[in-house]
Image (tube, grey):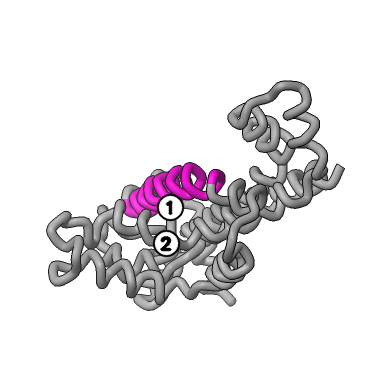
Amino acid sequence: MDFLLQGFLQGFLLLLSGDPETYSAIWATVAASTMAMAASLSVGIPLGFLLGHKTFPGKKIVRTLVDTLLSFPTVVIGLLVYAFLTHRGPFGGAGLLFTLPAIAIGQTILGLPVIIAMTATAVEALDKRLPMTLTTLGANSRQILWATVVEARFSIMLAAVSAYGRIVSEVGISMMVGGNIKWHTRTITTAISLETGKGEFAMGIALGMVLLTVALTVNILASGLKRKAVR
């Protein structure tokens, strides 16, 4: 047990002293997850709204596909993104492989089904009379869309929090398409995996504490949003 206590103490010292290698992994995680969340929200919310609000042929099949993608393994996503971005793939010329944008692309694919599914569920749970009431009041399609999003705002924010929790804690995508390159694409999760394998528990514990703090924050936000969404 001594090595664990020593690891925790050294981990705190690394965080408090501003260790460059530790914070490099933290900032890489923040950068990649921020890009992924921006893309997931900008695409997922409109698609989720359409899936929950509109009726069209094959809607049940689309919904089943989206729900299935909620459990899409991260290593499979990493494999697919790697295949597309490698120099032999269709987008190999873009030079994105082993970069933070490549990680963000994979994380977007990971978070997108969460946003779409939960947004669609939130829209479906709204009062069915809302669109008709707004129409009788003279609202146009854009105003109806905005009013629906405002009405479901807490559920949509819960979707965003849930997607971020899944994105920030994944390791398969970051390892496969990021390459775990020190000072460049090494994220919190890949650094923990590497440093623990090397026996460097101090940095692993330091980054683990950061990840646990993020997870705790996400859970607190999710709990608060759930209470507001059911009111």
Q: Which residue is mark 2?
A: 203
In front here: 169 or 134?
134
Task: For the residues labelled 2 and 1, say whether their Cβ atoms are less than 8 Å apart.
Answer: yes
In x, y percent, where is residue 148?
A: 69, 36
**What residue type is disc 1 on?**
Leu
The relative height of residue 52 versus residue 38 in the rendered view (above or below) is below
Of pointers 2 and 1, the one earlier in the residue sequence:
1
In x, y percent, where is residue 145?
A: 63, 35
Q: Report the side of 231 relative to 115 (left or right).
A: right
As drawn, the label of residue 14 is: 1
The relative height of residue 135 versus residue 75 in the rendered view (above or below) is above
As drawn, the label of residue 97 is: none
Q: Which residues are magenta?
A: 21-46
User: Judging from the image, what secondary structure is the residue with disc 2 in?
Assistant: helix
Q: Residue at x 70, y 55 (%)?
A: 121
User: Judging from the image, what secondary structure is the residue with disc 1 in?
Assistant: helix
In front here: 11 or 140?
140
Instruction: Single out the residue that lies furthest toward the right.
Output: 231
Quarter assignment of residue 216: bottom right
Q: Quadrant of the N terminus?
A: bottom right
Q: Report the side of 144 relative to 47 (left or right).
A: right
In x, y percent, where is residue 19?
A: 36, 49
